Each structure stands twice: as C-alpha cells, then as structure tokens.
Image: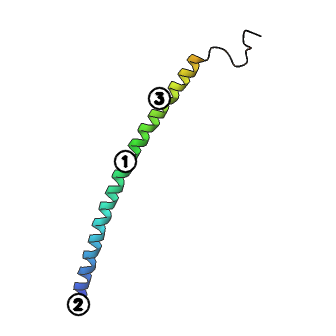
C-alpha cells in the first residue's frame, strides 16, 4: 500500500468513528434531557405532596401537644 491509500483509509476510519460518536452523544443527550424532565416533574410532585401534608397536619391538629387532655 502506498502512503496516500493508507492515509485515506485512516481518515475514513476516523470519520466513521466520529459519526458513531456523534450519534452516541446525541442519544445520551436525549436520555439526559428526558431524565431531567422526569426529575423536574417528580420534584414538583413532591413539593405538592409536602404542601398537602402540611395543610393536613395543620387542619387535624386541634390541641397543642403539651396541653393536658380535659379529663385531668
């Protein structure tokens, strides 16, 4: 093989690797984007549940914890 043919083959292999790497990076980017959307939705859902819990605790707590019951 002459040097030009060898260099051409090396360039072709590098271009093929670059194409596969670009595809892999794009797939990883899509996966990460989807995961962040899901994480963001879960964070918002957790915040809503936390708020509902606080509201429920406030609504159900009628007597302070240190107050003696009326039968004492």
Which sits earlier in the primary sequence, circle 3 or circle 1?
1
- Image quadrant where residue 26 sits: bottom left
* Residue depth check, mark 3 versus mark 1: number of the one nearer the observer: 3
Which sits earlier in the primary sequence, circle 2 or circle 3?
2
Determine whether, in the image, residue 58 is placed left or right of residue 25: right
* SS for dot 3: helix
Q: Residue at x 66, y 14 (%)?
A: 63
Report x, y in % for residue 47.
49, 31
Question: Badge 3 is on which residue?
Answer: 48
Q: Residue at x 50, y 25 (%)?
A: 52
* SS for dot 1: helix
Q: CA distance from mark 3 to mark 1?
A: 23 Å
Determine whether, in the image, residue 30 is placed left or right of residue 57: left
| Furthest residue in direction front, as rendered | 71
Q: CA distance from mark 1 to mark 2?
A: 47 Å
- Image quadrant where residue 62 sits: top right
Whether pointer 3 and pointer 1 mark residues with C-beta atoms closer than 8 Å, the reply is no
* SS for dot 2: loop
Question: Badge 2 is on which residue?
Answer: 2
Question: Badge 1 is on which residue?
Answer: 33
Indicate whether 40 appears above or below 56: below
């Amino acid at each position: 093989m002459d040097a030009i043919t060898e260099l051409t083959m090396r360039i072709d292999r590098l271009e093929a690797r670059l194409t596969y790497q670009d595809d892999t990076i794009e797939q990883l980017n899509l996966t990460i984007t989807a995961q962040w959307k899901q994480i963001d939705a879960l964070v918002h859902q957790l915040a809503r549940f936390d708020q509902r819990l606080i509201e429920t605790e406030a609504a159900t707590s009628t007597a302070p914890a240190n107050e003696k019951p009326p039968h004492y």
